[in-house]
Every structure is written in C-alpha cells, then in structure tokens.
Amino acid sequence: MTAVSTPPVTGRPGAYARLAKLDVFDYYLSAVLVWTLLVPAARFDGQVLGVLVVFLAGEVLLMAALVALDDLTGYRDGSDLVNYAPDAPARRACRKPLVAGTLTEAQVVRFAVVTTALGAALWLVAVIAAPFEPTWALLVTGVTLVLYPQYSWGLKLSYRGFQELYIAALGWALVLAPYGLLAGDLPGFVLVQALLFGLGPLLFGVYSNTNDIAGDRAVGRPTVAVLTSPRGNAAFVAAVSLVEFALILGAPLVGAPWWFPLAMLPTMVLRANQYALGFRRRDILRARRLGIGIHRVTVVCLLAVNLVGGS
C-alpha cells in the first residue's frame, strides 16, 4: 500500500476540528428546521429556545464522537488509507487527521469519550427542561443516544449492513426527537419533513459509497454498492430518489399546502440531475458533491414553506 506523506503529530485545535468535521453542518440544520416547524407563538419562547440550543449543542458533540470513531475504525482497518491515498487526489487526506498524521489513535479515543459524555449530559438536560415529554420522543432520543457511537464502533452497524439505514434514520431522529420534546405531538406534515431531511444525507452517502467500493469491500463493509452489481446499485439509488419524490408529491395529503410540490421543485430537478451525473455520465465524485448542495437547498425550501405557511 502506498504510504501517505504526512506532517508530524500536533494535536492542535485545528486537527480536532477537522476530526469532528465541524465544517460539515448538514445534520445540524435539523435544529433550524425544527424551529420553523413550531407554531409561531412558541418560536421565541425562552424555554423552547433554551432546550433547542442545548439539544443542538449535544448533537454537535455526539456527532463529533461518531465521526472520530469512524475515522479511527477506517484508519485501523485500512479503508481510509485506500480512499484517501495519494492516488485518489479528489479526496483530501487532511480531513482525516489519523491518515494525515496530525493526531494519534490515543488522542482520537480520548476525544470521542469526552465528546460522547458531554453530549449525553446535554441531551439529558434538554429532556429534563423540555416542555413536553411524549413517550415516543423520549424513546427516539434514548435510542439515538445509545446508537450514536455504534455506527462504526461497538456494534459497528455500518459494518453489518445497516449503513444506509443508519444515515437516514439519524436525520429522521434529529428532527423528530427535539420536535416532540418541544411540541408534544407529531403531525403528518412534520413526519414528512423529517423523512425528507434524513434522505438528504443518505442521497449524499450512497454516491460516496459508490466511489468507495474498493476500500469498503477490502475491509468487509457491506454497503449496497459493495453487495450489488453496478446496475443494482444504480437501481437502489434511483429507488431512494423516487421515494423522496413520492414524499414531496404526496405531502399535501397529510397536511402540507397544495403548493408544497411546487416549492420543492428545485430539489426534484437537482436530484434528477445528480442521478444523471453520477450514473449516466459516470462522474460519481461530482454527483457526491452535488448531494451536499441538494440537501441544503431542500432544507432552505422546507424553511421557506414553514415560515410562509405559518406552520
């Protein structure tokens, strides 16, 4: 295996920030979405805002632990050394401090332990201070907390065929849990928006997995892209994209305004272009990058609908 030229270990704050992937904020947009889903009278309530901020802070810390442990596992099993090697110039090794040599394994483990403990403590505070405690929201919060570090550590769910489900379910939970704690109910249109939010990271991840087939197969990470043929993988991505379309088109049946599909037209057009770019033009990395932008466009569209519609 070709070695990666790396600078010496530093342990500086910048290395930890890269380890936590703080520049990738897409899951954190869930807090803004939840805020717009609340009734207007609750949006500036001090208790509501306080709980939402605390929940978000816990989410950031827990996500930092998740990606740190994912980096640690990817470094130890060699998949990151393949996917971020010098012969893969489109991927920046500096985003992986272990591969780049700017953090040690022991530093990464300590970082993950501390961020998990602090994140869990903040979520406990949010639950205690929340204006509502519906059983389903408590269950979603508790299960999400337990499973947060299990993506590629502990149970290693992403190594047991659950990667795609995990990526989407995490997005769903990060909308449903705080909304339930702050509103106490679960309207159909809120559920649709939560499902759309979770599909955004998934429809970024499946393109990333398509690019990483060699590295994932080498370490036994059974993503759909690894387990199926190229045609089967393309069909899976198309099916997930169609589910997103169906949720958008069917949303007026569960309380969305009639014009909701028109408001979400940018998402549908961009998603179709992403698929064509990735599987017809065979430019997977560009399609992958486009996926990040599509998720953000989707969130902006949802925010606009909620604020204009007064939901």
Image: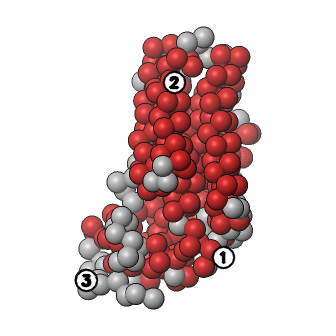
Is there a contact, CB below 8 Å, between mark 2 and mark 1? no
The amino acid type, in three-letter code, at marker 3 is Pro
Give the x, y percent position of residue 31: 47, 38
- The residue mark sitting in front, 3 or 2, is 2
Give the x, y percent position of residue 205: 54, 54
Colour scheme of the rendered structure? secondary structure
Give the x, y percent position of residue 118: 48, 61
Residue 169 visible here: no
Q: Residue 106's image quarter?
A: bottom left
- Relative to residue 181, is residue 55 drawn left or right? left
Q: Under tag 1, what secondary structure?
A: loop
Q: Is residue 235 positioned above or below 8 on the image?
A: above
Q: Under tag 3, what secondary structure?
A: loop
Q: Is 248 or 303 nearer to us in this picture?
A: 248
Q: Is residue 140 positioned above or below 249 on the image?
A: below
Tell me the crowding category of disc 1: few under 14, some 14 to 19, or many 20 or more residues within 10 angstroms, Cα based.
some
Which residue matches tag 3? 7
Tell me the crowding category of disc 3: few under 14, some 14 to 19, or many 20 or more residues within 10 angstroms, Cα based.
few
Give the x, y percent position of residue 293: 41, 41
Q: Is residue 177 positioned above or below 23 on the image?
A: above
Q: Is 294 or 102 nearer to us in this picture?
A: 294
Mark toward the start of the polypeptide (2 vs 1): 1
**Residue at 35% over, 83% down:** 4
Which residue matches tag 1? 220
On-image quarter of the C terminus: top right
Numbered tag placed on residue 264 in the rendering: 2
Q: Under tag 2, what secondary structure?
A: loop
Residue 214 visible here: yes
On-image quarter of the N terminus: bottom left
The amino acid type, in three-letter code, at marker 2 is Met
The amino acid type, in three-letter code, at marker 1 is Gly
